[in-house]
Amino acid sequence: MLPPPCQAGWHPDARLVHELGAPAVVLDADLQVLHTNAALTALGAATDAAPVLSPPDAGAVREVVALVLAGSTWTGELDLGLDGVTGGTTWWTPVWRSGEIAGALAVLSRSAAEHLSSDDFTDRLGQLAFITSELLVARDVATVTELVVHQVTDAAGATIGSLSVRLDDDTMGLTALRGAAAGAEERWAVYPVAGNTPAAESVRTGRRVLAQGHAEIQRRYPGLESAAPGERTLLCLPLTVATATIGVISLSFPGLREIDPTEDLFLRVLADTCAQTLDRLRQEERSVDRERKLRFLAEASAKLAGDLDYETTLAAVAELAIPWFADWCAIALESDGLLRTLSVAHSRPEHIELVERLQRDFPADPREERGSYGVLRSGESQLVPDVSDELLVASAQSEEHLRLLRILEFRSGLSVPLKSGDRVLGVISWVTGRGGRRFTEDDRAFGEDLALRAAVAIDNAQLHSQLRDSAVKLQQAVLPQQLPDLPAWETAVQYRAAGRSGVGGDFYDVVPLDDDRIAFFVGDVMGRGVEATTVMAQIGSAIRTLVAINPDPEVVMIGLDRVVESWHVDQLVTVVYGVADSARDTVRIINAGHPEPIRVPTGGAAELISTPSTLILGVGGGHRLAVTRPFAVGDSLLLFTDGLVEHRHEDLHVSLTRLLERVEQVRGCPDLDAAVARLVDEVGDPTRDDDVAALVLRRR
């Protein structure tokens, strides 16, 4: 059984070596004997204070001593070559003096004249069996890695252990490595399945690979770097599921090591169990990853569809992918052949400034075939599963550029085009750092799906923006920039655009006539955007033309009906038109389906001006009559569109009653513009997606 000196957590003091019941020797880094004990002398070793150490494989012993002096323990068969003691299975642990490691303690379990005890062998197999049982219930890859790379390495008596998994048909990836020389983990982070290495051979063939001794290793694998000086034994165990080999466990032993058939069987069973566990965890991870991607696409699609401010939305989408999908996401849009970075998100906020500095100080060459500009020109995504240091060196523009790139610790990269039809609008790039996701073809498909949705949203938003700009310009050209300044009349207007489009179909104007008369109108084209604004422009122009010919309300409305009928427009159009005559103190009103104007006399309550018929424009089949009302000095007239009085969750009668009460504030108010603005604020519903036009006329 494992003797007390090697139990986990036991830190023996050098003074206790002499009291150990098992034969023991303490060595320094130069393999000089520092201490021995009586049990070792009883085996026939020299009794002097410093016995001669002549191991058959000094390199193997030096490797183990260095490992122990670094603070590790080790168990395995190693011949120290002590005088009178040959062969032997040893357990190694650091010994301490005054809180510091003072040497490497080797506890010998047998001599050349003895055989490995059944208890010792049973203990080793028991450890392997325990590890196998733990693998069966492992819930994550980190647990599997810990069991395989650390506990299996110890239980098998190896000094170096590693676990590699197959990343794709051509590539292996190192999941974990223990005991190797500095830099080995970076050098072997990824390596080819086709390479001439023991691990790659084991994966290709699906068979155990055993190579014993330096000569055999160099003959079979020329150029393979040596893990440590001296003789070695390499053992690679394939991780096979059904007919596929998904990885490999690699063990490196100091010296020439024979693998007992029973131990070999246990190691094979352990490897099979490890393979089944990794396959199960992979399937679970893929399932979770698919669910995350579907949730992400649903959430991103909702954001993209819910807001025409695509720049803000894309920034939110970039944040959504961090950190579960990538450590870094950048979105850039094309403008005049150059990419303009729209958003950068990073899982480490302190790196955002670094990324922005890289883009500012070391902009990508638009002629490059790799990277974002290559994606922009080709319209094809680029996947770099493994970002090697060689690739960074090839991409760097200077030593400083390379230094900054290395700080980000790239592991994998994916860039996809924001493509709408044949147009490439921009590029989305994702990057992972060390320990992050290694992008695969599944990730490429996911990225292209997201980019397609984002591109459609961008295209729609840009088209909407262009249409909105056109509509705004058209509306600005049609609506009067200011109302005429007339000696007999005061005028004030409030126009409030609502909704995301920024333009609607409300229109108005005041047209001076002779004899201090004025013609006026307010109308509404149902709908929004360019189409509604175009109809609005046509109606306004037609009214002004008809007024120039004959301003009489009934004549104007008959002509307007004919014009609208001839256009065959689909929009519904309402309008109220009138002529005010200061000489006769009257106003004549005619209405085509529009809200009734309100007269505010100098004395008395405000009143609605109703007309006998209010058919909307262009429907035919009826005749409208104008009505005449008094319009004395100081009287006011309000014309408005339905956006002023139609409220959510409120009856129209209630809204009109409130308007009739509040409109009286325009009576006698010295600042008519301020009074009309206050009226719209108090009566209108800002939550409703409809424009408001309110025009007030007042006799001076």
Image: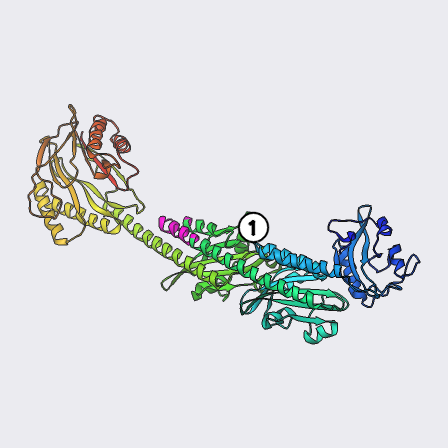
The residue that label 1 is drawn on is: 351
Specify whether residue 488 is in view: yes
- Residue sitting at the far front: 118
The foreground one among 43 and 676 is: 43
- Give the quarter of the figure containing the N terminus: bottom right
Q: Main secondary structure of the magenta part?
A: helix
Quarter holding residue 515: top left
Quarter holding residue 250: bottom right
- Residue sitting at the far top: 603
Q: Is residue 384 above or below residue 539?
A: below
- The magenta span reads 295-312
- Residue sitting at the far bottom: 219
Quarter holding residue 193: bottom right
Q: Residue, x 65% and y 66% (percent of image)? A: 265
Q: Residue 158: x percent and y percent?
A: 71, 62
User: Considering the numbered disc 1 on the image, is that residue within a helix, a strand or a loop?
Assistant: helix
